[in-house]
Image: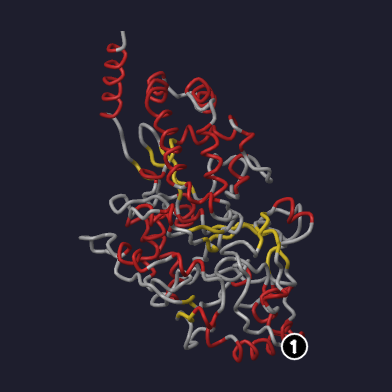
Amino acid sequence: MTRAPVACGALLLGWYLIFDRDKPERHENILEHFKYGSVGAEGRAGLPYWIWLVLPSIFPEHLPQQPGKGYARFGFVYESDSNKRPIGTSLREKQVPLVGLNCAVCHTGTVRDAPGMPARIVLGMPAHQFHFQSYFGFLTACANDQRFHANTLIPAIQKENPDFSWLDSVIYKFLVIPRTRDGILAEQQRLSFYERRPPQGPGRVDTFSPYKLMFGFDMQKDESVGATDLPSLWNQKAREGMWSHWDGNNNSVPERNKSAAIGAGATEDSLDLPAMKRVEDWIWDLRPPGFPKDKVNWSRVDSGKTLFGKHCGECHAAGGKLVGQVLEIDKIGTDPERLNSFTAELVEKMNTLGSGREWQFRHFRKTNGYASMLLDGVWLRAPYLHNGSVPTLRDLMKPPEERPRLFYRGYDVYDYTNVGFVSSGAGAERFGFRYETTAKGNSAGGHVYGTSLKPKEKDDLIEYLKTL
């Protein structure tokens, strides 16, 4: 009784795959390409597009209580209400079309001048509002729901796509939906070690633990916390040769870009090198947007510039002798968890990626501190320090014991006086993520530079930092 349907299904699948296609999303316009183009991540980490599209409408109870509709509640940025997909997602055309993530998902943010005002979308800035861990939690909640089956999903898909055929329905029922569910649940099991760590919150990601998994490290024995803030993508030309990745473990911009794409789901074989090169060329000279000129006290800028040169320039000014270099952890004094999470054993494995290819990784290393960096567009890189533990520049100039121990991050209303996003009050509490600096990996200690300046000097320095 069962052999005939199975044989029929196999024949249908074979016929279906014979006519399969594989067309990654590309755009002539580089801005559109950055926002929606493929980097090759759909195959390993992508989801069937039509399943992905209908999940929020089928499982609204698993969405977080955040502003927006559907995936916007995780901080995905939509250009308009009519867009089916947010910035940072790409589509690979196949018989089973796949949606994946690209560079823009981590490097596109929003800014608002006041509650209720429209958000400005800024390409290249850290996606301070994007909560990847919450997004993955939603996918796993859906996959664990008893309604994640063909009888629920297919009618919802057909409502969105009237061209969804009978053959599509058969393939989805017997192959695509079960494999998607099993794949999400398997990934949930692989990433279960995160349950022992503090939640990352929006704008932060643990870059290298997925690599440890890929290389077979036993993550159930790994107690390190590697969550850090997402970086900006501006002025990459100026950063070539500088040590980066927060702990200064790599000084090659192209290598870091490939590493990020693999972290987003691409493989050594699937990396779309020509597509990535277009993005690399664009961010090479990409400038950050300037701080609103009418919100700068220009009478203080010259004094602030002098203070910056005296107290900050060595580590943060173009040409400073320590810019792009690593400061030892005993000197910088910031939270050591991210530093400790990237081990010498992982370095050996990272430098095997791309073996036999022209682009094989060769620049990863183990350090004992965190790298200083240029401060271009620093106003849009809040919260501050490598783990995003200090909400504003004004807070960063306070002694560590006076910095906020609790604040809310991910709210996109801007505080132009203190230079950072609003992190307290009703709006921040309603729409933000509760960040506690007492949690492991979240310390706001260290980086005491400038904390002993007089109040007027701090005001002057802040006005100058606005202009970078």
Residue 302 location (% of width, % of height): 68, 89
**Image vertical order of residue 28 relative to residue 330, above or below:** above
Q: Nearer the viewer, residue 261 or 349?
A: 349
Residue 200 location (% of width, % of height): 57, 56
Which image quarter holds the N terminus? top left
Which colour assignment does the render follow? secondary structure
The residue under label 1 is 454
Furthest residue toward right: 426
| Quadrant in which residue 301 is drawn | bottom right
Is disc 1 placed on a helix, strand or loop? loop
Identify residue type, mark 1: Lys
Left or right of 96? Residue 362 is left
Q: Residues within 10 Å of mark 1 (few under 14, many from 20)?
A: few
- Residue located 42% across and 77% down the image: 242
Which image quarter holds the C terminus? bottom right
Q: Nearer the viewer, residue 144 or 393?
A: 144
Residue 4 location (% of width, % of height): 28, 11
Q: Nearer the viewer, residue 135 or 445?
A: 445
Left or right of 145? Residue 399 is right
